[in-house]
Image (cartoon, coloured by chain):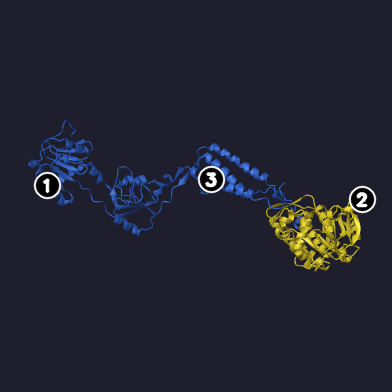
Amino acid sequence: MQWFTQLSSSLWQSPQWLWALAALAIPLVIHLLRRSNPREITFAAVYWLQQQPAQDWKRVRLRDRLLLLLRLLLLTLLAVMLARPLLQQEAPATSATLLVDPRIEQAALDHFLGEHNAFTRVFWLLSEPVPIDTPRPAAPDLWRTLSALADRARFRDADILLAYARNPSGHSALRVSPHWRWHALESGAPPPASPTLAQLGDGPPWLAVAIRSLAEASLPDIELKKLSNANSVDAQQLDWLIYDTPGRLPAALQAFVADGGLLISDRRVHPHGQLPFADIAGNEPLEAAAIGRGSWLRYKRDWHSAAFFRRADLPQQLWQQWAAQDWALQARNRAEWSIDAVPGLPVPDSAVQYARWFSPDRILLWVFALLLALERGIALGRRAVAPAAGEQRA
Amino acid sequence: MDALTLASTRDLVWLSRHIAEGMLLGAQHSQRRGAGLEFQQYRSYQAGDPIRHIDWKLFARSDRYFVREAEQESQMHVCILLDTSASMAQPSFTVPQLSKLQYARCWIATLCWLLHSQGDRFSLIALNDRGPRRVPEGQGEDHHRRVALELARLEAAGHWPDRAQIAPLWSLFEQPCQVVLVSDFFEGESADITGFAARLHAAGRPCLPLQLLVDAERTFPFDGELKIHDPERPGFTELAAGPQRADYLRAFAAAQRTLASRFAAQQSPLTSVAVEEPIELSLRRFIDAHGRIG
């Protein structure tokens, strides 16, 4: 029944076939013509039957209404099928849906679901949410993912479970659904990400001390690895590389930078050819060059000189200078937003596509086949009944 | 003997004898075999006479067929009155080949054979407004054959005859006789048939009624729209069966009660028979209702 209400608001791919609905007159006329054919019998005891005046309205009674109805339906279906409608399918109800941040541990999720057991459908929070029983995906960029989901009708009314209440914000505007209900397992922000550090060959003597001092002060998980072979440097595992061998830069290290790493050296290291080094403002003479996705940070002074490292604030200075040059780290540690005050723009209901078009051809075909079988069954079944005794067919 | 056999058998003589012999099994035969050996007269051959009764010597002499007739004594004359108005052509709705008239033929032929086997005399009068057909009273196998032949020729048509047409028949009832009236007694307001029976009763000729119906007249098993043809009237009646059924059944039952009480008042109970009923049973019922015939 819902379809028939939808049919009015539907699109027709071949609307000229709707003229075929005029064929509905054919079974109507046939049934009307057959009306005045009552069963004729010879019955001598007619004297005891009430003689009723012939009523004209009774004569236009339709016979075999069920058959007529079936035939009308069949013709209508045929015309509709030929006109090839496109129906709007309403999105399924979206309440009782939970979107889960993939950063959440399984145990924590189970605990949460144990406390809130009203959710019938649980998905991973992705731009294209997948059911929770699929393997855990990588953590997405929340800002972009939420913006993508804001106008999806299926997830308009969902509950969203995040690992942290505070999360890094993005650059474009955040779009949210005003119906979302927010949950977070931790009220704070995720711990700041620490870059992985390594030195190739012998580093400057103050380096190990400075890193240890940083770790003790504010960055407990920072650690300095020591590498000996330039070919073992990999931008996937290493963020910052300190290189202290004078001379030309090895090609492997240049490739490391191009892959997204941050190379730190002083002025005794030279590139192959010319690189567009740019000065960086600050009290330390410093220049940087972008190579591929990463950059090379070069001190203009010799960092073995006492003037360079004999300073109380050396570790903080180094951290500031290096972190400022690591854009990926900058992005990860950008400003935060909280689910308690969602900064996004609510997407109004009017902007949401609540329905999608689909073609009911297959269903119509099945219904047509069923109705046809039913109609034939009834029509042939009636014919098989022999005319009753004493009956006269005019 | 089922209804279909009844409907499809053309040989009334055989059929009636078959049924009657079945009924007489084990009964005392009072018939005098060879009764009427005493020669009475010659009579010219009529259709229906058995060939073996032809006197061949006389044929040789006269070149004409003559049949020897014998005297036969009987105490009883049963006159069978058969209504052959068009309504008697009503077929059964379960066995369409079987009409009331066909049932009446078989029934009467069987009754005649029973009468014959008792040595009684019987005659037949078939009545409708096209003029009566009759077989005069007689007895014996040949007479039975003649009656059967006449029965087979009858057709249902027209109405019950009016008074003027019946008047000449009254002379037939001057001799004492027992009347068996076979009809459906569908007479409407006029009450012609019961009136006729009442006059017979008043004249001291008790009239034993047999009413023939078809089962559908008692049950009205129809549905939907009906276009009904009344065999005794032109035209059609159109009506919806369902809403009429209760009224019809009530009216029909009331009419049956009236009819039965009318005959009960004449000490001749009405035997009402549906043609779907085997003849043995209905005949047995009829005979039981009136004691022994004769």
In this view, the mark in front (3 or 1): 3
Q: Which residue is mark 3?
A: A369
Q: Residues within 10 Å of mark 1 (few under 14, many from 20)?
A: some
Q: Which mark is residue B62?
A: 2
Q: Amino acid at mark 2?
A: Ser
Number of marks: 3
Q: Label 3: chain? A: A
Q: Nearer the viewer, residue A130 or A267?
A: A130
| Label 2 to label 3: alpha-carbon separation | 86 Å
Residue A17 lies, with reference to residue A213, above or below; the image says above
In the figure, the shade used to draw chain B is: yellow
Q: Is residue A323 visible?
A: yes
| Label 1 to label 2: alpha-carbon separation | 166 Å
Q: Which mark is residue A208?
A: 1
In the figure, the shade used to draw chain A is: blue
User: Horizontal and vertical percent for residue A69?
Assistant: 60, 47
